[in-house]
Image: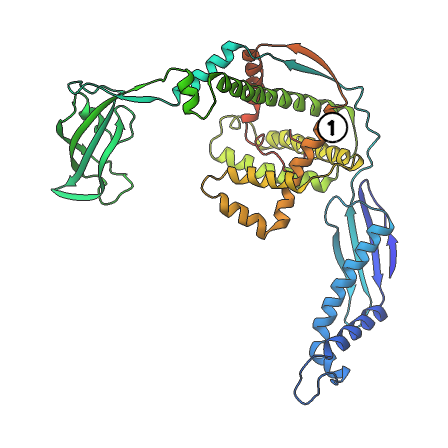
């Protein structure tokens, strides 16, 4: 094998490789001999098929496999011998080959840049700190109670109002015939919730327990059920109870009913949840600020292929969002948008390379437990399909490796944050939330949502 390094530019390394015909033919003959030991060809005993016959029947196929093997081995040798760190799959171009002759091909390898030494100790970040007061816990408990209303039956002569719940039986018919899906018993319907077809709930306002009413409605023409779409229907409704929704009192009984020892335990759990939530807000702010500093602090050449791949992914989503009428995109030309999102692509690639290098230099490892938690988190995003998600990753372990990128990023960020200096400013929880909302606003643009799984966020 002859290797010639061609003129290279930046991070792109170019080589020309020539594999002698003798090497190709020798390996082809060796592969044919090995295969011939078990081949069954009429007229010949296994293991005694003449080489000429093997070459005639299988020579081209075997030689094709041999060439692939030699190309892969040659490329791997070039990468290893030149101590290259490919950023992308090497590009191979066969320049000259005739059956029985030598093989000449070129290899273009785009490598990762050499990064400088990292000094994170001189980085200073502004960090918001906060305290959770009793009033914050009170508000959170109130929200919990509001999401857990209690229903109390009203007196038998109470007339149902909007906002009340009526427990009813109903039977729906069209032209005197019952239709599928139009019958239920002991159904609890909140009047004014728009849960039923328009006009249904309003006709039960004023009803009392024991009342029987006929509710007349017309199904919309575009109603999903073809059996009833555009048709007039009648519902025979029997009202069993009228109930009122009340927010429960936050007391010891409320806490015990939700699995806590007492009200103090509930409030402590609420406090811990609030702290966890706002710690996350603070960390996201620090992460954004850190990325801004890292982008400014470290300058190095980026692999063009990686930038193009990242930009291609983002641009497809931007185009789709623009076609769907995204208001944030309509006043910009494609050229303006491409410039903006190419800059985002470059930032992501840069931060991704930097954080990956932090992980490599500090020998950051990802445990099986961490990877399992990532799979569980992924599955939690698809309620009802968790089992299928788990089975998918079990059958495709290489796809689980894709989850390593975000884990590595977070661990690298944690390591850097453990070394920087903080300038702490105490803020109220309201101020913290407001600042987080201000930061999130620009991210609502198309493309800003497209966070790379293996690279730094924007």
Q: Position of residue 440 (x, y in %)?
A: 56, 22
Q: Element under label 1?
A: helix
Outermost residue, bottom side: 43
The residue drawn where x is 84% and y is 61% is: 18
Residue for badge 1? 415
Which residue is at the front of the view, 195 or 303?
195
Above or below for 352 versus 64 = above
Above or below for 118 versus 105 = above
Q: Give the quadrant of residue 200.
A: top left
Q: Going by the image, does 445 lie left or right of 80?
A: left
Above or below for 371 versus 246 = below
Quarter holding the N terminus? bottom right
Quarter holding the C terminus? top right
Q: Give the quadrant of residue 424.
A: top right
**CA neighbours of label 1 inside 10 A, class few (<14), some (14 to 19), many (20+):** some
Which residue is at the front of the view, 383 or 244?
244
């Amino acid at each position: 094998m002859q290797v010639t390094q061609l003129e290279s530019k930046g991070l792109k390394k170019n080589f020309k490789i020539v594999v002698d015909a003798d090497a190709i033919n020798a390996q082809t003959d060796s592969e044919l001999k090995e295969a011939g030991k078990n081949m069954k060809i009429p007229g010949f005993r296994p293991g005694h098929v003449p080489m000429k016959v093997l070459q005639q029947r299988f020579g081209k196929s075997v030689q094709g496999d041999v060439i692939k093997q030699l190309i892969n081995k040659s490329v791997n040798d070039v990468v290893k011998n030149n101590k290259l760190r490919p950023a992308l799959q090497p590009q191979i171009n066969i320049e000259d080959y005739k059956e029985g002759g030598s093989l000449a091909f070129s290899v273009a390898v785009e490598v990762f840049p050499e990064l400088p030494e990292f000094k994170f100790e001189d980085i200073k970040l502004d960090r918001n700190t906060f305290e959770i007061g009793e009033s914050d816990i009170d508000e959170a408990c109130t929200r919990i109670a509001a999401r857990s209303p209690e229903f109390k039956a009203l007196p038998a002569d109470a007339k149902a109002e909007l906002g009340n719940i009526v427990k009813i039986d109903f039977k729906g018919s069209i032209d005197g015939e019952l239709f599928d899906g139009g019958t239920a018993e002991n159904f609890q319907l909140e009047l004014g919730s728009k849960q039923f077809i328009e006009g249904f709930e309003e006709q039960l306002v004023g009803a009392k327990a024991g009342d029987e009413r006929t509710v007349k409605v017309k199904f919309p023409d575009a109603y999903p059920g073809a059996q009833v779409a555009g048709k007039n229907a009648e519902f025979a409704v029997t009202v069993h109870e009228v109930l009122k929704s009340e927010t429960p009192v936050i007391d010891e009984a409320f806490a015990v009913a939700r699995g806590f020892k007492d009200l103090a335990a509930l409030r402590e759990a609420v406090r811990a949840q609030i702290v966890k939530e706002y710690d996350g807000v603070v960390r996201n702010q620090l992460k954004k600020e850190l990325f801004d500093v890292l982008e400014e602090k470290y300058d190095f050449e980026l692999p063009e292929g990686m930038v193009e791949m990242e930009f291609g992914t983002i641009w497809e989503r931007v185009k789709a969002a623009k076609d769907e009428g995204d208001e944030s995109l309509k006043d910009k030309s494609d050229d303006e948008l491409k410039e903006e999102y190419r800059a985002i692509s470059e930032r992501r690639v840069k931060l991704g390379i930097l954080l990956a290098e932090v992980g490599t230099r500090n020998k950051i490892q990802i445990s099986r437990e961490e990877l399992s938690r990532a799979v569980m988190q992924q599955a939690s995003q698809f309620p009802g399909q968790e089992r299928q998600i788990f089975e998918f990753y079990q059958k495709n372990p290489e796809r689980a490796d894709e989850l390593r990128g975000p884990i590595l990023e977070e661990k690298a960020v944690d390591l850097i944050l453990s070394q920087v200096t903080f300038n702490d400013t105490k803020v109220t929880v309201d101020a913290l939330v407001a600042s987080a909302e201000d930061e999130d606003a620009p991210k609502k643009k198309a493309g800003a949502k497209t966070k790379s799984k293996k690279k730094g966020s924007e």
